[in-house]
Image (cartoon, rainbow, N blue to C red):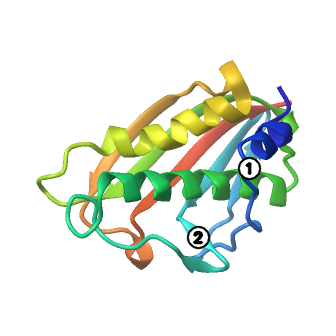
Amino acid sequence: MNPHNALKALQLELPASPKPQGWYVPVVRIGSLVFVSGQLPMGNGEVVFRGVVGGDLSLEVGREAAKLCLLNLLAALEGNGIPLNSVVRVVKLTGYVQSSPEFHDQPKVLNAASELLTEIFGEAGKHARAAVGVNALPLNATVEIEAIFEVI
């Protein structure tokens, strides 16, 4: 499965590779594993989705934020010399959802990113995952997602 063709079929484009929002590197490769730092729902250099899921934002808005985080993860790969067609397997996602104390559907928010990975990479997109609710994220972002990929 060609991930670029899958993105095109889904009418999705990768954004520009996001710039780090702090003192870290966006991608680290160790052997066949690539670790991508947490990505926010950025577009044109700004956080697109801000706020609290289950508070001022709905589950659906959280899901859209998760999809944008995922596209930024993939853009970080490509922007740091790891072509999408070199991905053998998505190993793990860890997602953080800025949520109200009463909100307990963080997995449903992250499902949007997980589903998209499977649409882009097929079986190789299936992965281990953690979905964590937090009271605050950098820049008041709604979601942050980090990932581990196996590549050739």
Q: Tell me if residue 46 comes above or below residue 77 in the rendering.
A: below
- Image quadrant for the N terminus? top right
Q: Tell me if residue 137 comes above or below residue 54 in the rendering.
A: below
Badge 1 amino acid: Gln
In the picture provided, is 91 more to the left or to the right than 136?
Answer: right
Crowding at dot 1, Cα within 10 Å, few <14 / some 14-19 / many 20+, comes out as few
Alpha carbon separation for disc pair 2 and 1: 18 Å
Q: Nearer the viewer, residue 148 or 61?
A: 61
Residue at (70%, 24%) from the top-left corner? 122
Element at label 1:
loop
Residue 11 is marked as 1
Residue 76 is marked as none
Single out the mark in the foreground, 2 or 1.
1
In the picture provided, is 95 more to the left or to the right than 133?
Answer: right
- Image quadrant for the C terminus? top right
Badge 2 amino acid: Met
Residue 44 quadrant: bottom right
* First of labels 2, 1 by sequence position: 1
Residue 42 is marked as 2
Q: Nearer the viewer, residue 38 or 68?
A: 68
Place of residue 82 in the rendered image (x, y in percent of width and height, measured from the top left): 84, 47
Place of residue 121 in the rendered image (x, y in percent of width and height, measured from the top left): 72, 30
Q: Residue furthest left?
A: 102
Element at label 2:
strand
Q: Tell me if residue 149 comes above or below residue 140 in the rendering.
A: above
Labelled pair 2, 1 in contact (Cβ < 8 Å): no
Residue at (58%, 70%) from the top-left corner? 42
Place of residue 79 in the rendered image (x, y in percent of width and height, measured from the top left): 82, 60
